Image: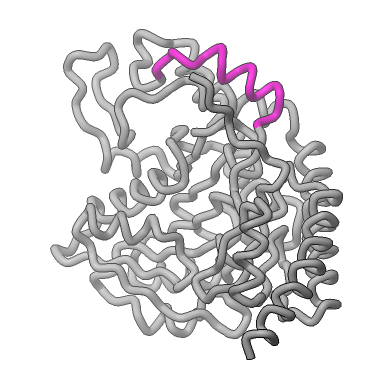
């Protein structure tokens, strides 16, 4: 095979990044182990317990339950599945803000639950009043987002948790991307700040673990009883994960990355990423673009379609928000030099596209 893996020198919109060297080495060592069969692979099963304990420390949960999933999609589906299976209604619904990840649409489709999407407020966060009006006696789960994928916004987590409690629903926080940067901010987002039941947090995003390494955490182990199925041919008697066989590479990689970087390395990385995001936001604002203030290390800006396509033509790996804005995620691999090069291309290509548009006129 002659193909080369993706280079990261022009990747600006991914929520994955280069694994930390220690995480890469650990992933390779445990690649062929299966934490889904803990009787046969006890070492990686023990590592998974360590991974969950580390994640619990990061999210303010002293005695966490959970497992290392394939990513945020699996974790979110499982959170919906827990809520659906626990619900005392035959017609369960899930209430989430419009900023919720598309994985919840997959979950609703696969699990046969109604998904109710409520609007955002002017700050691009969940509108708590709209959520309160939308929940009812059939609501099984309310979702809050701690670091939205389009704008990096953090929902009012304590208020959303209260809305869930009003109707005796579970409350899930999707912190897949934000979970490794929010500990170094003043946001209220985790198990210490609100009665959160379940949470998604992905080591393979800002945590710098190898892909795939997601995380699903729960306040109580009993919540996973809603997922357990018998596993008669394995040494373990039941399994609560969605996938059966899982590579131990993700588990070992998560442990290695967290032990190497928590907390100081992650704090320093957050500072670099946030500073880079603010620099880029200022640079684009100075050039006349409408920019969404980067609450976390993610920049969204309105640029023209010709300029967007021209930047892609130069090899920049960029994407759009649902409303069409340029979206840049300042992941650990995104350096100031990369952003300076990107802005230089914006200047050059913006002038070229303006000339092309005026010639067409």
Number of on-image labels: 0
Measured as percent of width and height from the top left, residue 302 is found at: 65, 77
Q: Let me know if residue 146 appears in the view.
A: no
Residue toward you, 253 or 228: 253
Q: Is residue 254 above or below residue 187?
A: above
**Residue at figure coordinates x 41%, y 48% from the top left:** 73
- The part of the chain drawn in magenta is 19-34
Q: Residue furthest top?
A: 40
Q: Quadrant of residue 148?
A: bottom right
Give yes or no for residue 32 being in the magenta stretch: yes
**Residue at figure coordinates x 83%, y 43% from the top left:** 268
Measured as percent of width and height from the top left, residue 247 is found at: 43, 22
Measured as percent of width and height from the top left, residue 78 is found at: 34, 46
Q: Residue furthest front?
A: 359
Residue toward you, 121 or 190: 121
Compared across the picture, whether 109 is left or right of 332 comes to: left
Q: Quadrant of residue 353?
A: bottom right
Query: Which quadrant of the rendered structure holds the C terminus?
Result: bottom right
Give yes or no for residue 322 being in the magenta stretch: no
Q: Is residue 211 above or below residue 104?
A: above
Q: Residue furthest bottom?
A: 361
Q: Is residue 71 above or below residue 174?
A: above
Compared across the picture, whether 79 is left or right of 304 comes to: left
**Residue at figure coordinates x 13%, y 63% from the top left:** 90
Compared across the picture, whether 309 is left or right of 185 comes to: left
């Amino acid at each position: 095979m002659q193909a080369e893996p993706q280079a990261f020198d022009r990747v600006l919109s991914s929520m994955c990044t280069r694994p930390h060297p220690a995480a890469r080495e650990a992933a390779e060592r445990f690649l062929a182990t299966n934490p889904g069969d803990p009787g046969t692979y006890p070492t990686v099963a023990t590592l998974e317990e360590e991974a969950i304990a580390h994640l619990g420390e990061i999210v303010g949960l002293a005695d966490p339950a959970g497992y290392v999933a394939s990513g945020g999609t699996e974790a979110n589906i499982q959170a919906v599945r827990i809520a659906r299976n626990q619900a005392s209604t035959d017609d369960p619904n899930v209430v989430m803000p419009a900023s919720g990840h598309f994985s919840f649409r997959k979950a609703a489709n696969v699990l046969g639950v109604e998904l109710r999407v409520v609007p955002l407020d002017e700050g691009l966060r969940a509108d708590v009043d709209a959520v309160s009006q939308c929940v009812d006696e059939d609501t099984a789960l309310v979702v809050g987002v701690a670091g939205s994928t389009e704008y990096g916004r953090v929902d009012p987590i304590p208020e959303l948790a209260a809305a869930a409690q009003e109707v005796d629903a579970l409350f899930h926080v999707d912190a897949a991307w934000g979970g490794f940067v929010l500990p170094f901010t003043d946001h209220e987002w985790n198990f210490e700040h609100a009665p959160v039941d379940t949470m998604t947090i992905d080591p393979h995003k800002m945590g710098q673990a190898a892909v795939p390494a997601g995380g699903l955490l729960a306040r109580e182990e009993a919540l996973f009883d809603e997922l357990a199925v018998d596993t008669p041919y394995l040494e373990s008697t039941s399994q609560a994960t969605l996938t059966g066989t899982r590579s131990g590479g993700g588990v070992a990689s998560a442990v290695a990355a967290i032990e190497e970087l928590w907390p100081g390395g992650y704090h320093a990385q957050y500072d670099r990423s946030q500073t880079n995001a603010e620099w880029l936001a200022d640079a684009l604002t100075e050039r006349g673009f409408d920019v969404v203030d980067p609450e976390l290390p993610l920049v969204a800006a309105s640029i023209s379609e010709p300029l967007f396509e021209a930047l892609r033509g130069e090899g920049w790996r960029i994407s759009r928000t649902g409303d069409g804005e340029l979206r840049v995620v300042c992941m650990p691999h995104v350096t100031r030099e990369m952003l300076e090069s990107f802005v230089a291309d914006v200047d050059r290509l913006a002038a070229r596209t303006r000339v092309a548009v005026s010639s067409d006129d």
